[in-house]
Amino acid sequence: MSLFNKVVSGISKGASEITGNSVKSPTRRICGGGWQVMGPHTKAPDTRTTEQLLDNIDYFAQRNPEVAKFQQELKEMNPKHLGLVSDICELANSTEMLGTSLDIKDPRLVGKNVFATWMEKLPKASKENPEAVELAKEVINQTDDTASKYFLAAYNGILDHPEAARHMSATRPLVKDIAESTLAGSYTMDFSKEQKFINALNGYISPTADVEKIELMPNMLKTAGSIPGDADIRIEAFPFIQSKVPMSKIKENLEVFPQVAEESLRQGKDINMTDFLMYNTNLD
């Protein structure tokens, strides 16, 4: 069970002056109007300036008591984390035209105002638990609005766990792959895909998961992708990261995996990469 399962209790527009108000309208990134992309996708890089992001905080503070209460603390955060503040504000003030639209201001969602929780905790986390902030940024960068809000609700306690920093850092490069494997497909009219995404994250950000094996996974994916031909190479992440197989043995097997895989594929065989790395089964 993930360290953070316990926190789940249910589950660019130009800046123009607002008439009679010195606060500029926000420079938006993810909720700019029109049709929203659904499912896993990589958002465009955040090119907003620090000044624009500070203006955004002022704008949302005028309209959201959750932001106003912590306005100064939010503006004093590490500038590289201001984009996340603005993104969460956009999500909190948006509604998807779907039956599964989430209101993260509504305390009925998980027994608390999720939006207020993030605004309160982000300034401290920016200093003391930056890996949690970076993980949240990556989730929003790789998922649609519904999945992003679901993550914010399910992981509203993540900012309180700096002891999981290495697990979060190791998991962050895998978020895109996790999103693509759990959130793809047609609209299901429920939150089953979003919960599947959260369950997958929980498997990585868990004290029982071997963080060294998680850190190796990007190299595994790169190695698997380098095998020529139409290779069916299975990677079963959770048995792998939960295994007690010594890392020295896994690294030895990874070095010879490309040759073994190419030979197996020439013979018309499929290959389970994780089994090979853990047990060297294809050489027995």
Image (spheres, helix red, strand yellow):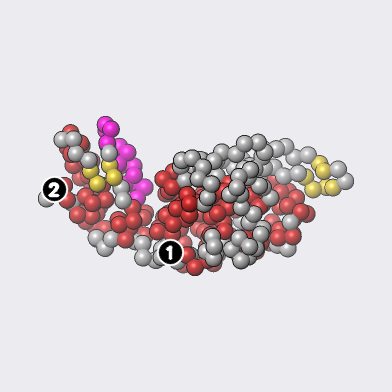
* Sequence-first tag of 2 and 1: 1
Going by the picture, which residue comes out furthest to the left? 284
* Residue 163, x across and y down, in percent: 46, 67
* Residue 227, x across and y down, in percent: 27, 36
User: Which residue occupies 28% across, 32% down?
Assistant: 230
User: Which residue occupies 27% across, 36% down?
Assistant: 231
Residue 218 in view: yes
Indicate yes or no whether the magenta region holds residue 263.
no
Which residue matches tag 1?
Answer: 2
Which residue matches tag 2?
Answer: 283
Q: Kindly report the distance in space between the C-alpha atoms of the residues bearing marks 2 and 1.
A: 35 Å
* Position of residue 136 in the picture relative to residue 56 (left or right): left
- Taking depth in this image into account, of 6 and 190 the one nearest to the observer is 190
- Give the amino acid type for the residue marked by disc 2 in the picture: Leu
Indicate yes or no whether the magenta region holds residue 227.
yes
The span shown in magenta is 217-231
Circle 2 or circle 1, nearest the eye:
1
As drawn, 273 above or below 111: above
- Say what secondary structure mark 2 lies in: helix
Residue 79 in view: no
Instruction: Tell me the quarter of the picture where residue 243 sits.
Output: bottom left
Q: Main secondary structure of the magenta part?
A: helix
- Say what secondary structure mark 1 lies in: loop
- Give the amino acid type for the residue marked by disc 1 in the picture: Ser
